[in-house]
Image (cartoon, grey):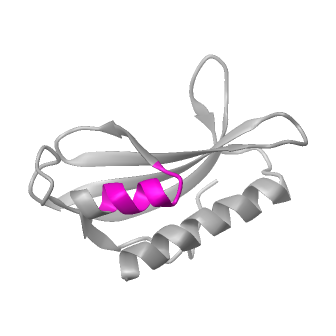
C-alpha cells in the first residue's frame, strides 16, 4: 500500500541526520547504493501474527551515500506485509493496529526532519 499525504514526500535531509532521525523513529537504513536508500520499520501484528514493514524510499539529490553530508529526498512511503521466504506484498488489507503504529512512526520522523 502506498501511503499518500504523509507529509514526508519531498522532505530533504543530509544522510547523517536522516540516519539519526530514522533510528529514533524506529527505522533502519536497510538497502542502499550510491544514490538511493531504503529505510524500513518492522511492525508485528499481534492479532494475526503477521509482519509488516513500513518502507521509505529516498534518493540522493546531491552527493553520494558514501558521505554523511549527501542530501537525500524522500520519494515514497509504502506499507507491506512480509512474505516467505522474502519480499513484501503491498496489495493485502492492513489491520487498523498496524496502520495506527505506522502513522505514529511517520509523524515522529516527520517532526524530527522538520525540526
Q: Going by the image, does 94 lie left or right of 32?
A: right
Question: Relative to 6, is 67 above or below?
Answer: above
Residue 5 falls in which quadrant of the image? Answer: bottom right
Position in image of residue 64 (x %, y %)? 11, 49
Q: Going by the image, does 32 lie left or right of 34?
A: right
Magenta residues (range): 18-27
Q: Residue at x 17, y 47 (%)?
A: 65
For the residue pair 105 and 90, the one nearer the viewer reads as 105
Q: Residue furthest bottom?
A: 115
Residue 16 falls in which quadrant of the image? Answer: bottom left
Q: Residue at x 47, y 78 (%)?
A: 111
Question: Which SS type dominates the magenta stretch?
Answer: helix
Q: How many marks?
A: 0
Which quadrant: the C terminus? bottom left
Question: Relative to 99, is 6 above or below?
Answer: below
Q: Residue furthest top?
A: 85
Q: Residue furthest right?
A: 47
Please say whether residue 23 is one of the residues in the magenta stretch: yes
Q: Going by the image, does 27 lie left or right of 102?
A: left
Position in image of residue 77 (x %, y %)? 51, 59
Question: Relative to 50, is 61 above or below?
Answer: below
For the residue pair 46 and 59, the one nearer the viewer reads as 46
Position in image of residue 76 (x %, y %)? 45, 60
Q: Residue at x 38, y 81 (%)?
A: 114
Position in image of residue 100 (x %, y %)? 75, 64
Q: Residue at x 49, y 45 (%)?
A: 40
Please say whether residue 98 is one of the residues in the magenta stretch: no
Amino acid at each position: 500500500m502506498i501511503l499518500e499525504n504523509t507529509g514526508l514526500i519531498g522532505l530533504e535531509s543530509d544522510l547523517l541526520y536522516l540516519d539519526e532521525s530514522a533510528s529514533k523513529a524506529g527505522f533502519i537504513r536497510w538497502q542502499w547504493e550510491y544514490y538511493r536508500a531504503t529505510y524500513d520499520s518492522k511492525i508485528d501484528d499481534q492479532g494475526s501474527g503477521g509482519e509488516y514493514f513500513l518502507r521509505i524510499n529516498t534518493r540522493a539529490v546531491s552527493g553520494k551515500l558514501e558521505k554523511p553530508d549527501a542530501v537525500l529526498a524522500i520519494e515514497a512511503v509504502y506499507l507491506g506485509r512480509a512474505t516467505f521466504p522474502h519480499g513484501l506484498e503491498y496489495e493485502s488489507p492492513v489491520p487498523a493496529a498496524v496502520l495506527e503504529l505506522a502513522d505514529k512512526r511517520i509523524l515522529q520522523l516527520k517532526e524530527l526532519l522538520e525540526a
